[in-house]
Amino acid sequence: MSPKKRRSKGRTALNTTVLLALLATSGWLTVEMRQRADTGRLPALGSLRADPTASDGATDAPAAAGRVTYLRLTHPARTVARDKDGDVLATFTDGARTAVLTGPSRTFAEPRTTQATVVTDSWVRLLPRAWTKGAEQQKWFTTWFHKYLGSTAEDVFAVALQYGDGAKPAKNALGQRFRGDSQFGPVDVVNQRKEQSDFYDYLGASFTFKDGLRETPEKSKYGSLDCSGFVRMVYGYRSGYLLNATDQSTGAGLPRTANGIATGKPGLPILPLVKTGNTTNPLYYYARPSTIDALQPGDLVFFELDKRTGTRLDHMAIYLGLDTDGHARFISSRKEANGPTLGDLGGDSRLDGDGFYAKWLRSAKRI
């Protein structure tokens, strides 16, 4: 949903500069996106490389040398991996597949819509299975950790930024465009961007879900992703999280809508939903979280923007982390931007302060 502000007729730019701090004497190096041949319905992912002359086996980067210590923390229950110097290597949360690994620093920017930038050394990836206490002792984890610690292969953030304004398109072996500049949705009769564009609409290809339901895309929605469709594209189709066809589908997959994902089973509530208590004539049903300190990069955040939707949460985003001004910034697909944006068109993409989206933040999940 969009705030009641002047709609911009222009298309938001999501010009992303990805930088890696690799050489202390030479400063920042620009990251290049390398495309490679894709096979199968779930496209193989390319890799981010800082040095064009380096080996392209980025996903085979070995774990950092030295002893790794695993520390248990609470609120939420999680395991933190530290190196011999005590520096954090990764964080794994009980009940969630989302893992945050420390890697080369990158900078995300969208200069046409915000002066803010996000400089982060967080690389968000999905574990093969949900984390449990003691999983660091299991073979599947040691294999996975060795593969991804220090790797610059595409992660959740790299994939998310492949759908912004001007993002280069790429096709898989089936001839499907699986990435590139995305719209929010087609224009309706009153010149408003329509919602309900899922990942298969963007692809322009039918998709059969695990329960056997087959969804067929609408031609008018080709190349479009609404807010939850964007998250399902990034975390599901591209990164491998199981997807459900609808909010009513059973199982551990991501439901179709923002409300379904927020209130459904998958993932761990990080900022739980709290009712306002005003049951007589509530303007809004849920309360704003008292703090956002528990958030980590990659968390899904949910908003209650329109009182006409009743008790439903009607917008969602991916939390990126703190920007260079110290504000908690997110990326989402929205009408004003006509697609994914980390900028401030139609409202600041911030979770702190008294901006539009900050005021209507209601919950967060770590899937």
Image (cartoon, rainbow, N blue to C red):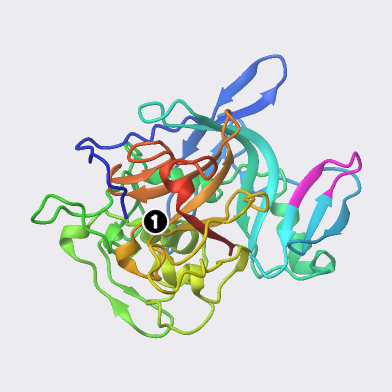
Q: Judge whether 334 appears above or below 85 on screen.
A: below
Quarter holding the N terminus is bottom left
Residue 219 is situated, as x and y percent measured from the top left of the image, at: 16, 62
> With 208 as the anchor, is 293 left or right in this view?
right
Nearer-the-camera pick, 134 or 337: 337
| Farthest residue, direction front | 280
Q: Judge whether 217 appears above or below 226 on screen.
A: below
Residue at 63%, 64% in the rendered image: 97
Residue 100 is situated, as x and y percent measured from the top left of the image, at: 67, 51
Quarter holding the C terminus is bottom right
Observer able to see residue 98: yes
Residue at 62%, 42% in the rendered image: 152
Residue at 39%, 36% in the rendered image: 344
- The verdict on residue 86 being magenta is yes
Which of the 4 quarters of the picture holds residue 307? bottom left
Residue 157 is situated, as x and y percent measured from the top left of the image, at: 52, 46
Which of the 4 quarters of the picture holds residue 205? bottom left
> With 361 as the anchor, is 102 left or right in this view?
right
Q: What residue type is labelled 1?
A: Phe
Residue 81 is situated, as x and y percent measured from the top left of the image, at: 81, 52
- Helix, strand or loop at mark 1: helix
- The verdict on residue 271 being magenta is no
Number of marks in the rendered image: 1
The magenta region covers 82-90
Q: Judge whether 243 appears above or below 172 on screen.
A: below
Observer able to see residue 41: no
Q: Mark 1 points at which residue?
A: 230
Nearer-the-camera pick, 260 or 240: 260
| Farthest residue, direction left | 189
Circle 1 residues within 10 Å: few <14, some 14–19, many ≥20: many
| Farthest residue, direction top | 25
Which of the 4 quarters of the picture holds residue 118? top right
